[in-house]
Image (spheres, grey):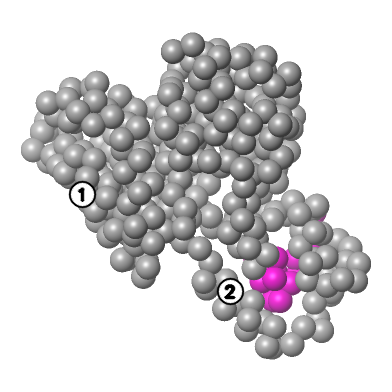
Amino acid sequence: MDRRQIAEEVLAAVGGRANVTANDICMTRLRILTENPSLVDTEQLSAARGVLGYVKRGSNGIEVVFGPGKVEAVHEALVELTGIEADEEVFEDVEDARKPAIHVHITPNPLRDAAIVQSEEDAEEGLGPRASSVDDLMSLLDVIDDSPVTADAPDAAEGADEEDEDAAAGDVETRPARVLVINGPNINMLGIREPDIYGHDSYQSLLRLCQDSAREAGFADCTCFQSNHEGDLIDAIQDAYDSYTGIVINPGAYTHTSIALLDAAKAVGLPMVEVHISKVDEREEFRQVSYIRAACFETITGMGIEGYRKALFDLAAHVGL
């Protein structure tokens, strides 16, 4: 497929040219910063030709994953279509914004809880899960209190009463449930790769199944991510901390080799289901070992892509949806 056509499909999925404020590439990822994240159609993006997956970055950023050797050409076409040159520094700021707000002293309840509540409202509108930059925090504080609040005023919330604290805590408990589906190496080759073992369903079919099943199971949002690189998978697990309710994961061949994935899963401590399309326990001896299994409450094998549907429903039941 022509690189320009791929770029046009991606642009349409992220809200059009006018919604793109910056772009860059990193390894196999096309990075896009949007003006209005609510305009991003992640289902349409997942279905775009050549797209292997995506991961959200900060409140306005999204990274679109392509196969090796393709992302450069698509990025070049994206630059031509938007007239916006790559800007690596902008995305360094996005990465920083995802970290704890080290320049702002956030006091305990209700100031911190109120900030979280506002971020949940943002999530319902398609915005980021919670504010973590100084500017975003100041905006949240302005919503909480019409009077000016500065970063040097850690005692601003001292006058809040217990009723407000209980209300904020109640809202936190009802935050929308989000699920992350992680696929490892070669899963993007479904339908092409050894169909006698992995079936004839395409990766795009898998993405549609996950989106539909997650919605039916009661999840408010489903993010699908795929990479052939171990470090990318570790990053995706770490990024899920405090952003997702649980994870469905098929690490592919890294199932049998990666202690690092297990360590990342244990670190974030999220409920996790291990999925394999084939009956790995009946295959080669080297596939009998699963490191990631030690971090999962359930393992599903041999059901084809329908195993993902079961995993999503079982995960929903596990977290009480």
Residue 23 versus residue 19: which sits nearer the camera? 19
Q: Residue at x 82, y 84 (%)?
A: 159
Residue 92 versus residue 206: which sits nearer the camera? 206
**Mark toward the viewer: 2 or 1:** 2
Q: Residue at x 53, y 66 (%)?
A: 175
Amino acid type at circle 1 is Ile
Residue furthest to the bottom in view is: 162
Which quarter of the picture shows residue 96?
A: top right
Task: From this view, report whether residue 181 is shown above or below residue 269.
Answer: above
> Dot 2 lies on which element?
helix
Q: Position of residue 156 (x, y in %)?
A: 84, 74
Q: Is residue 309 visible?
A: yes
Residue 29 versus residue 37: which sits nearer the camera? 37
Q: Residues within 10 Å of mark 1 (few under 14, many from 20)?
A: many
Q: Which residues are magenta?
A: 103-116
Q: Position of residue 292 (x, y in %)?
A: 31, 46
Q: Which mark is residue 70?
A: none
Q: Residue at x 59, y 51 (%)?
A: 126
Which of disc 1 and disc 2 is earlier in sequence? 2
Judged left or right of residue 266, residue 213 is left
> Dot 1 lies on which element?
strand
Residue 114 is a magenta residue: yes
Q: Position of residue 202 (x, y in %)?
A: 28, 29
Q: Which residue is mark 1?
A: 300
Q: Which mark is residue 171?
A: 2
Q: Position of residue 91 (x, y in %)?
A: 69, 33
Q: Quadrant of the N terminus?
A: top left
Q: Are marks 2 and 1 in contact (CB under 8 Å)?
A: no
Q: Residue at x 58, y 41 (%)?
A: 40
Amino acid type at circle 2 is Asp
Residue furthest to the right in view is: 148
Residue 249 versus residue 211: which sits nearer the camera? 211
